[in-house]
Amino acid sequence: MNFTLDPTRHAAPQVLEALRAAIVSLELAPGLALDRAELAQRFGVSQTPVRDALIRLGEEGLVVVRAQSATQVSRIDVPAARESHFLRRSIEIEIARQLALAHDDGVIHELTAQLARQAELGQRKDYPAFIAADKEFHRLMYVAAGLPRLWAVVTRMSGHVDRLRLLHVPAQGKADAILDGHQAILGAIATGDAPAAQQAVREHLTGTLAAVDEIAQRYPEYLILD
């Protein structure tokens, strides 16, 4: 994990952001032990911002902090992933309806451009960047609906499902299915068809969790199933 602090910003939030990104990207794998002193040295900070970041990540369920033993990156909690996924799907179904009814040409243009960027990344099989582009497509929907703070809440709750998605995307056909889902959502928004936009979101946000058994067979050491 290579990281350089921005001297114009406080260190603590940067440490939190970097550790969270490394965990969600699986650069820090589930079950990996985290040494506070080593992390502090790597970031070039005292142990205090590292400790605070680990506490925050523990609250999100991304690390397991134990007083008398090593802190570890948590395994992927599938029940927690289902809960956060339910929340996100419920919100985005309503967002899709609002955007379809609003039929804002500027929003449609922005989503179209983002989908094109994601398709290019899919062709290159750059899966981390592809997933980042996937998230950006959805973030733009929240922003267009006037709900950027709600996207921040959803993001904080989505660490487990984000890691599941990263394990699933390389599967044959998954990237194409994501793109098809985005195209269906965008197409319904562009035509002002609110029910179709809602249904497209329902179908789009089912793939990864529907494939939990397949993911568990490939990565049994990474998952907590119940």
Image (tube, rainbow, N blue to C red):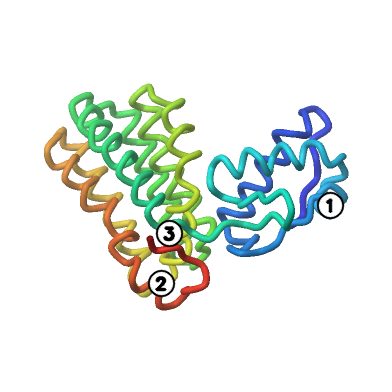
Q: Amino acid at mark 2?
A: Ala
* Residue for point 15% across, 34% down: 194
**Of circles 3 and 2, which is in front?**
2
Q: Earlier along the polypeptide chain: callout 1 or callout 3?
A: 1
The residue under the point 58% across, 61% down is 26
Type of the residue with mark 1: Arg
Image quadrant occupied by the C terminus: bottom left
Q: Closer to the observer: label 1 or label 2?
A: 2
Q: Residue furthest bottom?
A: 217
Residue picked out by circle 3:
165
Q: Earlier in the sequence, mark 3 or mark 2?
A: 3
Q: Disc 1 versus disc 3: distance between alpha carbons? A: 28 Å
- Disc 2 crowd, CA 10 A, few/some/many (<14, 14-19, 20+): some
Query: Residue 158, how many percent across, how many down?
Result: 45, 45
Please, what secondary structure does the residue beneath circle 2 have? helix
> x, y (%) of residue 155?
47, 40
Measure how far apart labels 1 and 2 are at the Cα level: 32 Å
Disc 1 is placed on an element classified as helix
Q: Which mark is residue 216?
A: 2
Give the spatial CA distance, label 3 vs label 2: 12 Å
Q: Residue visible at 44% across and 77% down? A: 218
Q: Position of residue 21 (x, y in %)?
A: 61, 49
Find residue 42 and name its label: 1
